[in-house]
Amino acid sequence: MLVAPSVLSADFGQLAHDVRRICDAGCDLVHVDVMDGHFVPNLTIGPVVVSAIAAAATKPLDIHLMVENNAFFVDLFAPLQPEFISFHIEEEKHPHRLIQKIRSLGIRPAIVLSPHTLPERLEYLLEDLDMVLLMSVNPGFGGQCFIPNVIAKIKRLKQLRDAINPDCLIEIDGGVNDTNIVMLRDAGVDVCVAGSYVFKHHNIKTAIDTLHV
C-alpha cells in the first residue's frame, strides 16, 4: 500500500514544516486537494501555495482537482510537475482529451469518481489512465466518515482494471485509518489518502507505518 497524506489536514500556519514531517516519516506521495468553491462548497489553495508545498516536499505530488474548468487548472499546476493530476469525471465533458493533455505534459493522468458514480463510466477510459481515485466521502471537506458501500465499488473497479489495464492504480480517499486499511487493501486498493488520521495522530511516523500494509 502506498500512502499519500493529504495536506488539507496539515497546519497551514506551518505548512512547509508539516510537509517535511510526512516526507521524513516515509510517505510515498503528498496529496494536494485543489478546490475552487464551485464544484465543491470549499475553497483551498492555488499554484503559489502548491509551489511552496513542492519546494518543501521530498516526495512526488499527487494533485486532486475538485474544480470546474479542469483544463484551465491543469495548465496552472503542470509547471510544478506533479506525479499525478486527477480530475472528476462528473465535471469533465471531454475526459479522453484531458487525459491526453495531462500525459503530454509529462504527468500521469488519473480520474476521480465521487461516491455516487459507477465504475462502469470508466470502461472506455481505463486503458489510458495511470490511476483511478475513488472518493469514500463526499468531496469537499476533510474529517468525514468512511462510506461503507464504497468497498463493493472498489471490488468492481478492480475487476474492470484487471481486465483492461492491470497497471492502473486504485486510490482511495476519505475516512481512511488503521481500522479499515486492511479491508481496503484486500478489496483492491493500491494507494490510500489519509488526512486527519495522519496529521492528528500523536506520532505521524506511526500513523503512516500502520497504513503501509
Image: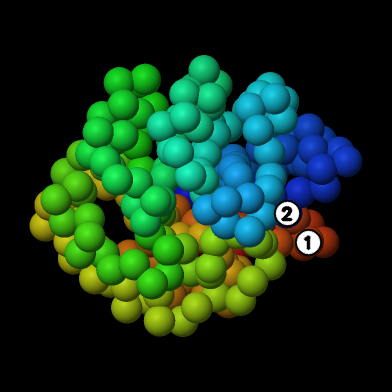
Q: Is residue 6 visible?
A: no
User: In the image, what residue type sits under mark 1?
Assistant: Lys
| Residue 160 image position (x, y, % from top left) | 17, 61
Identity, as a three-letter code, of the amino acid under mark 2: Ser
Q: Which residue is mark 1?
A: 200
| 146 relative position to 116: left or right | right
What kind of element bears circle 2?
Answer: helix
Indicate the position of residue 98 as horizontal and vertical percent values: 31, 34
Q: In the figure, 108 relative to 211: above or below?
A: above
- Is 75 situated above or below 31? above
Q: Which mark is residue 102?
A: none
**What residue is rendered at 63% in x and 59% in y?**
41
| Residue 50, percent from left and from top | 66, 30
Mark 2 sits on what residue? 9
Q: Callout 1: helix, strand or loop? A: loop
Tag 1–tag 2 contact (CB < 8 Å)? yes
- Tell whether 144 sits left or right of 181: right
Q: Nearer the N terminus, badge 1 or badge 2? A: 2
